[in-house]
Image (tube, rainbow, N blue to C red):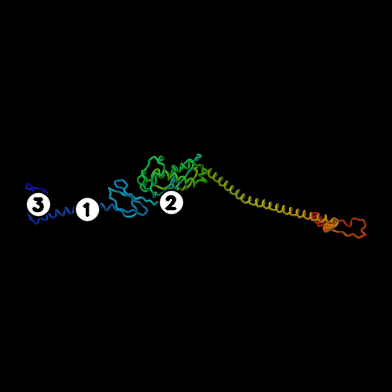
Amino acid sequence: MARRPGGGSDFDRMLESFGPAARNLSRRFRGLGFILAILVVGLIVVIWLATGIYQVSTGEIGIVRVFGKEDEQTLPGLHWRWPSPIATVDKVRVEEIRRLEVGFRIVDPGPPATITPFPVESLMVTGDENLVDVKMVIQARINPGPVGTTIDEQQLYLVRPRKTGASAFIFNVFDPGGAPDQITLRDAAETALRQVVGEGTLDDILTEERSAVEDKVKILLDELMLIYGTGLQIVRVQIQSVDPPSQVQAAFDDVVAAKEDRVRLINQAEAYRNDIVPKSRGEAEKIILDAEAEQRRRVAAALGEAAHFEAVLAEYRQAPLVTRTRLYLETIEKVLSSTKEFILSAGAGGSVLPILPLGDTSQQDQAAAAGASQ
């Protein structure tokens, strides 16, 4: 507003024309404007401070950074921190199980699932210089405890400060275009898998040693995560498939089938052995027991005959004639009891025809044999 040389503005001169009441009203409006300005500034400050209220959901940990440096960690619930740009908060899902595919990507979970192979990750060389295609799934989570230098520091290229799992996950690893549970974990998983596969043979990896490979990869990958300070903990390593390259798939299928046949035949042979060996041992034991029983019977019979002979000898020494006569009569009785008798009339003469054994002689032979054995 223009001022005149006499001082004061045109508005003031106009108010003066209305008298003292107008001048008092002008002073009051000027004081009210100052108060309104203070109220507006205070409201802006309150709104700015209110933007520092934040909520941490269940299963998350909030990491508050003041001017980029970690200040504190907050548990689930409502919290306040200095508003931006003084402080910011990062929320990390510590209870989430992170899944990572190595050697393939799931395009559509299905069912049936649709995957895209990544040969640059899955093709690797075994210890016996064979090419194999291995697809693997990694499950990891944020380590709930402190992460520090538990490995010998001489093995580390960089000794990192002790941080909890969430802090290490946020601050220790930077992956351009990704996250620590993607690029870093994927590269480390591929490294661990190639090292373990390179130490084994193709036959072991294809058939019997798959679970051992999973355990070794998990141990090695846990060590790499600790060395890198990612704050990640490996929960599970699961090999999805182990296949030879497609160019030689048919030949490897034949090899695997032959090995399965070998195992089947070995199992059948062991089953037959387990069946026949106990039977043979049982029969051998039975023969031994029968022989021992026959031995004891014959020894007992021989001892009995010897005792009988000694008793007869004692009687013979006391009465030789009587004992001899009795022995003779007992012998004749035994012989005649097993002999078939023929009675001839006096008219038969000297012909031998009437006493020829023209009938069944099998009974006579059996009787004669029994008498001879006695």
Q: Confirm whether residue 358 shows in the render.
A: no
Q: Does residue 299 sit above or below 193 in this rendering? A: below
In the rendering, at what x and y percent does residue 12 appear?
A: 9, 52
Q: Which amino acid does label 1 sit on?
A: Gly
Q: 172 or 179: which is nearer to us? A: 172
Q: What element carries label 2?
A: loop
Give the residue at the far front of this rendering: 318
Q: 152 or 301: which is nearer to us? A: 301
In the rendering, at what x and y percent does residue 234 appear?
A: 42, 48
Which residue shows up at 33% across the image and 55% down it?
Answer: 77
Which residue shows up at 56% across the image and 45% down it?
Answer: 259
Tag 2–tag 3 contact (CB < 8 Å):
no
Mark earlier in primary sequence (1, 3)? 3
Q: How far apart are marks 1 and 2 (CA)?
A: 54 Å
Q: Is mark 3 on a helix, strand or loop?
A: helix
Q: What residue type is labelled 2?
A: Pro
Q: Distance between the residues labelled 1 and 3?
A: 31 Å
Left or right: residue 8 versus residue 236 is: left
Q: Which label sits in the foreground, 1 or 3?
A: 1
Q: What element carries label 1?
A: helix
Left or right: residue 239 versus residue 163 is: right
For label 2, the residue is: 109
In the rendering, at what x and y percent does residue 7 appear?
A: 8, 48
For label 3, the residue is: 12
* Image quarter of residue 329: bottom right
For label 1, the residue is: 42
Local crowd size for mark 2, using a 10 Å CA cut-off: few (<14), some (14–19), many (≥20): few
Left or right: residue 99 versus residue 89 is: right
Left or right: residue 356 versus residue 216 is: right
